[in-house]
Image (cartoon, rainbow, N blue to C red):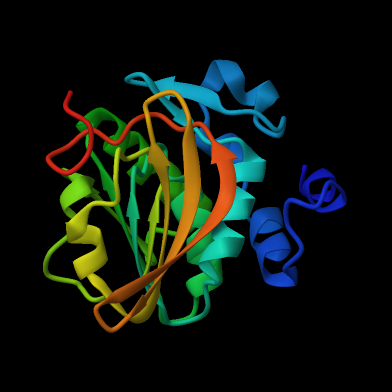
Amino acid sequence: MVSRLKAMGYISSPEVIKAMEAVPRHLFVPEGLQESAYVDTPLPIGGGQTISAPHMVGMMVEAAELGPGMRVLEVGGGSGYHASVMAQLVRPGGKIFTMERLGSLASIARKSVSEAGYEDTVEVIVGDGSRGLEGHQPYDRIVVAAAAPSVPPALKSQLKEGGKLVIPVGSKFHQELLKITRRGESYITESLGGCIFVPLIGEQGFLE
């Protein structure tokens, strides 16, 4: 899987390549779909949610420019795969706080994260990720794995100076993946291309 993503130009960072090689994706998909775990496609994980296609995980993780010791907020934790790949990159000393709206998925994520060996680096929290997560900010990086109609103000405010936010923004049917860098009270936005994600449901996202 990782060799294909590298050959197709989705990922190029040696650190990201190693991280994706290290994390066993089959631990994060439902039992009946494990034969498809390493196919480059999104897969259903319950509750109307999906685990993102590996190429999209790779692209987002590479765009986030993660490094050891970083404090990262993930919104839309799903089954915990994306958070675990990021955990590999922020070790040693880093921390991933991943927000999941559905308690049933959060329970699955905690189990899968533990089985993969990242429970010391990843904390799974149930809540409205569109509002961010108070108490641990500012974050070096914020990565959103669900589509917002616009960039939630809470996420921008919880980003540290020089920090980066990676988020898909648009309609429920098509979005643009944005990379936003904070410079004081200004936010520099770069487009990484079109994408399709499940909607970010919450106070500063789409209404349920």
Q: Residue 10: x and y, percent?
A: 73, 51
Q: Is residue 102 left or right of residue 37?
A: left
Given residues 144 and 43, the one toward you in this image is 144
Residue furthest to the top: 32
Given residues 166 and 43, the one toward you in this image is 166
Q: Residue 137: x and y, percent?
A: 20, 73
Quadrant showing the C terminus:
top left
Q: Is residue 66 visible?
A: yes
Point 83% across, 46% down: residue: 8
Q: Is residue 79 left or right of residue 196?
A: left
Is 94 drawn above or below residue 125 in the view shown? below
Q: Residue 121: x and y, percent?
A: 39, 66
Given residues 168 and 50, the one toward you in this image is 168
Q: Residue 207: x and y, percent?
A: 16, 27
Point 51% across, 65% down: residue: 64
Point 32% across, 40% down: residue: 148
Q: Quadrant of residue 93?
A: bottom left
Point 81% across, 53% down: residue: 6
